[in-house]
Amino acid sequence: MKRLVASVFVALASISIVPPHALAAEPERTTVSFTDEGTFPADVCGYALGYDVEGRVTMRIFHDEDGVPTRAITTGPIHGTFTNDETGAESTFSLSGPGFYDGSLTLVRGTGNWASFSGEGDLVITSGDATLDGGAGALDGHTRSVCASLAG
């Protein structure tokens, strides 16, 4: 009996010294699979640009002790194939991120590979660290123009 009481006491004492974040609930997880296809008009690349994107993405939403979202992360494979509809030339890219979101679930940072539009309206594949601020952002990495690579 003394051993049981001592074990319970040690267990309760250890709980009281565990940092609060260690007691936080597991993140909420949502996984979705998707496909999307269509065509960007000629004013994007100077020719009609077809796209076919598919993926399976998991979003993990982290909450504070009151259940309010504090941040989120998306991960998972996404692949996009882009086609010059005039010549049939095509390229496939991994666009898997990951993406990092603030407490309002607004995308604020992306690393890895992404497809996005440059400030000039060109469709580009970005590789590196992108910091986003309400749609505008900065890229510390490499960009590759999808339009230029399929123009020939």
Image (cartoon, helix red, strand yellow):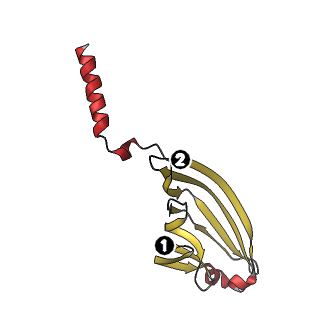
Q: Is residue 40 above or below residue 21?
A: below
Q: Evaluate whether residue 96 shows in this view.
A: yes
Q: Residue at x 55, y 56 (%)?
A: 76
At label 1, the amino acid type is: Ala
Q: Residue at x 53, y 57 (%)?
A: 74
Quickly name the residue at label 2: 28
- Front residue of this view, candidates 74 and 77: 74
Q: Residues within 10 Å of mark 1 (few under 14, many from 20)?
A: many
Which tag, 1 or 2, sits closer to the chain's start? 2
For the C terminus, the quadrant is: bottom right
Please identify, in this view, whether the residue under mark 1 or under mark 2 is nearer the observer.
2
Q: Quadrant of residue 148?
A: bottom right
In the image, is 112 to the left or to the right of 31? left
Q: Quadrant of residue 20?
A: top left
At label 2, the amino acid type is: Glu
Where is residue 3? Give x, y as percent. Answer: 24, 17
Where is residue 44? Give x, y as percent. Answer: 69, 82
Q: Which mark is residue 130?
A: 1
Q: Residues within 10 Å of mark 2 (few under 14, many from 20)?
A: few
Q: Is residue 118 above or below residue 63?
A: below
| CA distance separating discs 1 and 2 | 25 Å
